[in-house]
Amino acid sequence: MKGLLSCCGLVSMLLLSISAQAEQTSALPADCTQIRTQSPQSPSGLYDLQPVGVNNRLKVFCEMRSAEGWIVIQKRTGGLLPFNRRWAEYRFGFGSLAYDHWLGLEKVYLLTKDETKKWTLRVDLWDTEGNTAYAEYRNFRLGDEQTSYKLQVGKYRGTAGDAIRGISPDMDENGFGFSTLDRDNDGCSPCLFYDILVEECIMLQGGGWWYSKCGSASLNGDWYSSGDHTSWSSGLRWTTWKTPKTSSFKATRMMIRPE
Protein backbone atom coordinates (compact mmCIF):
# COMPACT_ATOMS: atom_id res chain seq x y z
CA MET A 1 0.00 0.00 0.00
CA LYS A 2 2.83 2.38 0.91
CA GLY A 3 4.49 1.57 -2.43
CA LEU A 4 1.29 2.43 -4.27
CA LEU A 5 0.93 5.71 -2.43
CA SER A 6 4.57 6.54 -3.13
CA CYS A 7 4.06 5.79 -6.83
CA CYS A 8 0.94 7.97 -6.91
CA GLY A 9 2.87 10.75 -5.24
CA LEU A 10 5.59 10.59 -7.87
CA VAL A 11 3.02 10.64 -10.67
CA SER A 12 1.31 13.67 -9.09
CA MET A 13 4.61 15.49 -8.79
CA LEU A 14 5.44 14.70 -12.42
CA LEU A 15 2.07 15.98 -13.61
CA LEU A 16 2.48 19.15 -11.57
CA SER A 17 5.94 19.67 -13.04
CA ILE A 18 4.67 19.20 -16.60
CA SER A 19 1.78 21.57 -15.88
CA ALA A 20 4.15 24.19 -14.48
CA GLN A 21 6.42 23.89 -17.50
CA ALA A 22 3.48 24.24 -19.87
CA GLU A 23 2.26 27.30 -17.97
CA GLN A 24 5.76 28.82 -18.07
CA THR A 25 5.99 28.22 -21.84
CA SER A 26 2.55 29.68 -22.52
CA ALA A 27 3.51 32.72 -20.45
CA LEU A 28 6.39 33.62 -22.75
CA PRO A 29 5.96 37.02 -24.42
CA ALA A 30 5.09 37.16 -28.11
CA ASP A 31 7.35 40.11 -28.92
CA CYS A 32 9.80 42.59 -27.40
CA THR A 33 7.23 45.37 -27.03
CA GLN A 34 5.19 43.10 -24.75
CA ILE A 35 8.28 42.66 -22.56
CA ARG A 36 8.83 46.43 -22.49
CA THR A 37 5.20 47.11 -21.59
CA GLN A 38 5.08 44.54 -18.79
CA SER A 39 8.49 45.49 -17.40
CA PRO A 40 9.50 49.04 -18.39
CA GLN A 41 12.97 48.65 -16.87
CA SER A 42 13.86 45.63 -19.01
CA PRO A 43 17.27 46.24 -20.62
CA SER A 44 18.26 45.48 -24.19
CA GLY A 45 19.49 41.91 -24.47
CA LEU A 46 18.60 38.30 -25.26
CA TYR A 47 15.05 37.09 -24.62
CA ASP A 48 12.88 34.07 -25.43
CA LEU A 49 9.69 34.77 -27.37
CA GLN A 50 6.78 32.58 -28.42
CA PRO A 51 4.58 34.11 -31.14
CA VAL A 52 0.93 33.11 -31.40
CA GLY A 53 0.54 29.80 -33.23
CA VAL A 54 4.22 28.84 -32.88
CA ASN A 55 5.08 25.78 -30.77
CA ASN A 56 8.75 26.52 -30.16
CA ARG A 57 10.33 29.46 -28.37
CA LEU A 58 12.50 31.82 -30.41
CA LYS A 59 15.59 33.44 -28.93
CA VAL A 60 16.11 37.02 -30.15
CA PHE A 61 17.91 40.22 -29.25
CA CYS A 62 15.50 42.92 -28.05
CA GLU A 63 16.52 46.53 -28.56
CA MET A 64 14.59 48.32 -25.82
CA ARG A 65 13.51 51.90 -26.35
CA SER A 66 11.41 54.32 -24.29
CA ALA A 67 7.99 53.10 -25.40
CA GLU A 68 8.60 49.87 -27.30
CA GLY A 69 10.91 46.93 -27.86
CA TRP A 70 12.35 46.02 -31.25
CA ILE A 71 13.40 42.54 -32.44
CA VAL A 72 16.77 42.81 -34.19
CA ILE A 73 16.74 40.70 -37.37
CA GLN A 74 20.04 41.91 -38.86
CA LYS A 75 23.09 43.68 -37.45
CA ARG A 76 26.43 44.51 -39.06
CA THR A 77 29.24 46.52 -37.50
CA GLY A 78 32.30 45.21 -39.36
CA GLY A 79 33.73 42.60 -41.67
CA LEU A 80 34.46 39.74 -39.26
CA LEU A 81 31.19 37.90 -39.96
CA PRO A 82 30.80 37.05 -43.66
CA PHE A 83 27.29 37.38 -45.12
CA ASN A 84 28.06 35.71 -48.45
CA ARG A 85 26.16 32.53 -47.52
CA ARG A 86 23.79 29.93 -48.92
CA TRP A 87 20.03 29.44 -48.57
CA ALA A 88 20.06 27.13 -45.54
CA GLU A 89 22.11 29.58 -43.48
CA TYR A 90 19.88 32.52 -44.38
CA ARG A 91 16.85 30.38 -43.59
CA PHE A 92 17.96 29.37 -40.09
CA GLY A 93 20.19 32.34 -39.22
CA PHE A 94 23.87 32.81 -38.37
CA GLY A 95 26.20 34.89 -36.22
CA SER A 96 25.90 35.90 -32.56
CA LEU A 97 22.56 37.45 -31.53
CA ALA A 98 24.31 39.88 -29.18
CA TYR A 99 26.65 41.06 -31.94
CA ASP A 100 26.64 40.82 -35.74
CA HIS A 101 24.03 38.35 -37.00
CA TRP A 102 21.18 37.41 -39.31
CA LEU A 103 18.21 36.15 -37.28
CA GLY A 104 16.87 33.79 -39.96
CA LEU A 105 14.14 34.03 -42.59
CA GLU A 106 12.07 31.25 -41.03
CA LYS A 107 12.08 32.96 -37.62
CA VAL A 108 11.03 36.28 -39.13
CA TYR A 109 8.23 34.51 -41.00
CA LEU A 110 7.04 32.84 -37.78
CA LEU A 111 7.13 36.16 -35.95
CA THR A 112 5.07 37.99 -38.59
CA LYS A 113 2.69 35.30 -39.88
CA ASP A 114 -0.14 36.15 -37.44
CA GLU A 115 -2.37 38.29 -39.67
CA THR A 116 -4.16 39.84 -36.69
CA LYS A 117 -0.96 41.75 -35.89
CA LYS A 118 0.79 44.34 -38.06
CA TRP A 119 4.52 44.95 -37.98
CA THR A 120 6.89 47.84 -38.66
CA LEU A 121 10.34 47.30 -40.18
CA ARG A 122 13.06 49.78 -39.25
CA VAL A 123 16.42 50.07 -41.03
CA ASP A 124 19.21 52.05 -39.32
CA LEU A 125 22.27 53.12 -41.34
CA TRP A 126 25.65 54.55 -40.29
CA ASP A 127 28.17 55.75 -42.86
CA THR A 128 31.95 55.99 -42.43
CA GLU A 129 31.78 59.76 -41.80
CA GLY A 130 29.57 59.41 -38.73
CA ASN A 131 26.26 60.30 -40.40
CA THR A 132 23.10 58.32 -39.68
CA ALA A 133 19.76 57.78 -41.39
CA TYR A 134 16.76 55.50 -41.01
CA ALA A 135 13.87 54.06 -42.98
CA GLU A 136 10.66 52.64 -41.52
CA TYR A 137 8.01 50.59 -43.32
CA ARG A 138 4.58 49.78 -41.98
CA ASN A 139 2.78 46.49 -42.69
CA PHE A 140 5.99 44.47 -42.90
CA ARG A 141 5.63 40.73 -43.37
CA LEU A 142 7.43 37.76 -44.92
CA GLY A 143 5.78 34.92 -46.77
CA ASP A 144 6.68 31.31 -45.99
CA GLU A 145 9.44 29.27 -47.63
CA GLN A 146 7.10 28.22 -50.44
CA THR A 147 7.04 31.87 -51.52
CA SER A 148 10.82 32.16 -51.01
CA TYR A 149 10.03 34.38 -48.01
CA LYS A 150 8.45 37.03 -50.21
CA LEU A 151 8.88 40.57 -48.88
CA GLN A 152 5.87 42.75 -48.10
CA VAL A 153 6.19 46.37 -46.94
CA GLY A 154 3.69 49.20 -46.75
CA LYS A 155 3.98 52.95 -46.24
CA TYR A 156 7.48 54.41 -45.87
CA ARG A 157 8.78 57.18 -43.62
CA GLY A 158 12.28 58.23 -42.65
CA THR A 159 15.44 60.10 -43.64
CA ALA A 160 17.22 57.48 -45.77
CA GLY A 161 14.75 57.36 -48.66
CA ASP A 162 12.59 54.48 -49.87
CA ALA A 163 15.33 52.23 -51.31
CA ILE A 164 13.17 49.10 -51.14
CA ARG A 165 10.90 50.55 -53.81
CA GLY A 166 13.99 51.97 -55.46
CA ILE A 167 15.22 54.89 -57.47
CA SER A 168 13.15 53.70 -60.45
CA PRO A 169 9.98 51.56 -60.80
CA ASP A 170 11.82 48.57 -62.26
CA MET A 171 13.99 48.34 -59.10
CA ASP A 172 11.06 47.83 -56.70
CA GLU A 173 11.99 44.95 -54.35
CA ASN A 174 8.59 44.83 -52.64
CA GLY A 175 6.87 41.54 -53.48
CA PHE A 176 10.04 39.65 -54.42
CA GLY A 177 11.37 36.44 -52.88
CA PHE A 178 14.75 36.17 -51.20
CA SER A 179 17.83 35.22 -53.27
CA THR A 180 21.10 33.59 -52.17
CA LEU A 181 24.15 32.15 -53.92
CA ASP A 182 22.34 28.85 -54.49
CA ARG A 183 18.74 30.12 -54.86
CA ASP A 184 17.96 32.72 -57.55
CA ASN A 185 14.60 34.50 -57.12
CA ASP A 186 15.42 37.90 -58.61
CA GLY A 187 13.91 39.62 -61.65
CA CYS A 188 17.00 39.51 -63.87
CA SER A 189 17.11 37.38 -66.99
CA PRO A 190 19.42 39.24 -67.71
CA CYS A 191 19.31 42.87 -66.45
CA LEU A 192 21.22 45.98 -67.38
CA PHE A 193 22.54 47.43 -64.12
CA TYR A 194 24.44 50.73 -64.47
CA ASP A 195 25.65 49.64 -67.95
CA ILE A 196 26.62 46.19 -66.64
CA LEU A 197 24.84 43.13 -68.07
CA VAL A 198 23.78 40.98 -65.09
CA GLU A 199 22.54 37.37 -65.19
CA GLU A 200 21.95 37.12 -61.42
CA CYS A 201 21.91 40.03 -58.97
CA ILE A 202 23.47 37.88 -56.28
CA MET A 203 26.63 37.49 -58.37
CA LEU A 204 27.00 41.28 -58.64
CA GLN A 205 25.87 42.44 -55.21
CA GLY A 206 26.61 39.43 -53.00
CA GLY A 207 25.11 38.27 -49.73
CA GLY A 208 21.41 37.44 -49.75
CA TRP A 209 18.52 39.82 -50.35
CA TRP A 210 15.09 40.44 -51.88
CA TYR A 211 16.55 41.40 -55.26
CA SER A 212 14.25 42.60 -58.03
CA LYS A 213 16.29 43.83 -60.97
CA CYS A 214 19.15 44.13 -58.48
CA GLY A 215 17.42 47.06 -56.76
CA SER A 216 18.50 50.08 -54.74
CA ALA A 217 18.80 48.35 -51.35
CA SER A 218 21.17 45.54 -50.37
CA LEU A 219 22.52 45.32 -46.83
CA ASN A 220 24.04 41.83 -46.85
CA GLY A 221 26.81 42.30 -49.41
CA ASP A 222 30.54 42.61 -48.67
CA TRP A 223 31.60 44.98 -45.88
CA TYR A 224 34.27 47.54 -46.83
CA SER A 225 36.38 49.78 -44.63
CA SER A 226 36.43 53.56 -44.99
CA GLY A 227 37.65 54.70 -48.40
CA ASP A 228 37.54 51.21 -49.91
CA HIS A 229 34.94 51.32 -52.68
CA THR A 230 36.77 49.33 -55.33
CA SER A 231 33.85 46.91 -55.51
CA TRP A 232 31.06 49.33 -54.61
CA SER A 233 28.29 47.25 -56.19
CA SER A 234 28.71 44.50 -53.58
CA GLY A 235 28.86 46.79 -50.55
CA LEU A 236 26.19 47.66 -47.99
CA ARG A 237 23.94 49.79 -50.17
CA TRP A 238 20.93 52.07 -49.70
CA THR A 239 21.21 54.25 -52.78
CA THR A 240 18.32 56.60 -51.98
CA TRP A 241 20.56 57.94 -49.20
CA LYS A 242 24.08 57.57 -50.61
CA THR A 243 25.16 57.32 -54.24
CA PRO A 244 26.40 53.90 -55.37
CA LYS A 245 30.11 54.73 -55.41
CA THR A 246 30.07 55.81 -51.75
CA SER A 247 27.32 53.62 -50.36
CA SER A 248 29.21 50.90 -48.51
CA PHE A 249 28.18 51.72 -44.95
CA LYS A 250 30.05 51.25 -41.70
CA ALA A 251 27.09 49.66 -39.90
CA THR A 252 23.50 48.61 -40.47
CA ARG A 253 20.67 47.26 -38.35
CA MET A 254 17.24 45.91 -39.24
CA MET A 255 14.55 45.60 -36.56
CA ILE A 256 10.82 44.83 -36.35
CA ARG A 257 8.09 45.56 -33.82
CA PRO A 258 4.30 45.24 -33.71
CA GLU A 259 2.41 48.42 -34.63
Image (spheres, rainbow, N blue to C red):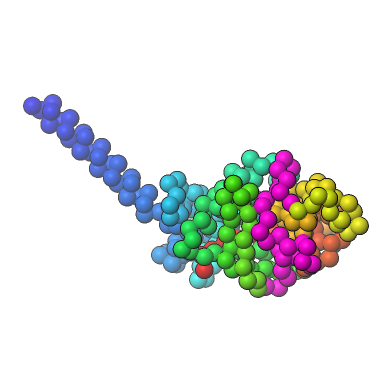
Residue at coordinates 77% horizontally, 66% vertically from top-left?
A: 169
Residue 96 visible in this rendered orientation of the protein:
no
Magenta segment includes 126: no
Which residue lies at the image location 71% right of the left edge and 49% below the top edge? 185
Q: Looking at the figure, which quarter contains the N terminus?
A: top left
Range covered by the magenta-colored residues: 158-186
Q: Does residue 52 appear in the picture of this structure?
A: yes
Q: Who is closer to the viewer here, 139 or 107?
A: 139
Q: Position of residue 173 (x, y in %)?
A: 71, 60
Question: Residue 177: x and y, percent?
Answer: 66, 52
Across the whole image, how many numbered discs are drawn on residues? 0
Closer to the camera in the image, 101 or 87: 87
Q: Which quadrant holds residue 126? A: bottom right
Give the residue displayed 67% in from the left and 64% down from the top.
124
103 vs 229, left or right, is left
Between residue 207 and residue 189, name the one nearer to us: 189
Q: Residue at x 65, y 73 (%)?
A: 157
Of the pair 99 and 244, the residue shown nearer to us: 244
The furthest residue to the front: 189
Q: Main secondary structure of the magenta part?
A: loop
Asked if 96 appears above or below 194 in the picture, the reply is above
Residue 29 pos. (x, y %): 42, 57
Q: Is residue 28 left or right of residue 215?
A: left
Q: In this view, which residue lies farthest toward the left?
A: 1
160 drawn magenta:
yes
**x%, y% of residue 64?**
53, 63
* Quarter holding residue 119: bottom right
